[in-house]
Image (tube, rainbow, N blue to C red):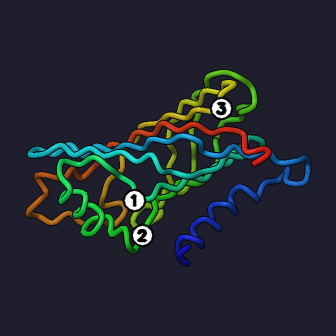
Amino acid sequence: MRRGHLITWLSLLTVLIQSPDLCAQERVLLRLDRSEVTFLSEAPLEHITASNTNCTGLVDPAARTFAVQVPISGFEGFNSPMQREHFNENYMESSDWPAATFAGRIIEGVDLTQPGTYSVRAKGTLKIHGIEQERVVPCTVVVAPEGVRVTAAFDVAVADHGIRIPRIVQQKIAAVIKVKVDVLFKNDKGK
């Protein structure tokens, strides 16, 4: 594991560990079991979409904390193989910043062990392209026997994360990217 990758994971896990009720009882963590993160760039001359199903993450239901990591090079789709290559090498620079992360806490005091559907806000640090931004992301959480499903849709301005779009392709790449998330967390007990 690369040093930068290890540091990212250690910082994400720190969010989960630093909780006031750490000693209260045995921790039950939910591990990301299934994921799909999709982005859409809608520019005047071109629409680009790609998805990633290789995400990792944890949720601590008692503390309502979470940490999710999305490997940048795991996005597939695009309109051509060359477009994917340019995405990784020229814009996201995935060799320098291999993952995007979102770590934080669910604002609302919902009980993530009780079945139901909840509208919540996830407040945390979104790190893309090495630049951190504090974000509040509206989410729908469905707690069911098969696990905890989280869906969300939000926008990311590429300039907020230091991603430069050359003038020559500004009509082909949107300044604001639409992101959709659909993930399922399951109980990690016994693994």
Q: Nearer the viewer, mark 2 or mark 3?
A: 3
Residue placed under numbered mark 1 in the picture: 72
Vertical arrangement, residue 145 with respect to residue 186, above or below:
above
SS class of the residue under badge 3? strand
Gap in angstroms between the C-alphas marked 1 and 3? 26 Å
The local crowd at label 3, few if under 14, some if 14 to 19, many if 20 or more residues have their Cα within 10 Å, is some
- The numbered dot on residue 97 is 2
Q: Position of residue 36 (x, y in %)?
A: 44, 41
Q: Mark 1 near mark 2, Cβ–Cβ under 8 Å?
A: yes
Q: Are marks 2 and 3 in contact (CB under 8 Å)?
A: no
Residue 45 drawn at (x, y percent):
8, 46
Q: Residue at x 26, y 44 (%)?
A: 49
- Residue closest to the far front: 191
Furthest toward the top, the residue is 116
Residue occupying the point 20% across, 42% down: 42
Q: Is residue 175 left or right of residue 62?
A: left
**Which comes before the other along the chain, label 2 or label 3?**
2
Residue 21 in the image, given as x and y percentages of width and height: 85, 50
In the picture, measured across the screen, residue 151 lies left or right of residue 31, that is left
Compute the Cα span from label 1 to label 2.
8 Å
- Name the image quarter holding the N terminus: bottom right
Mark carried by residue 149: none
Residue denoted by label 3: 147
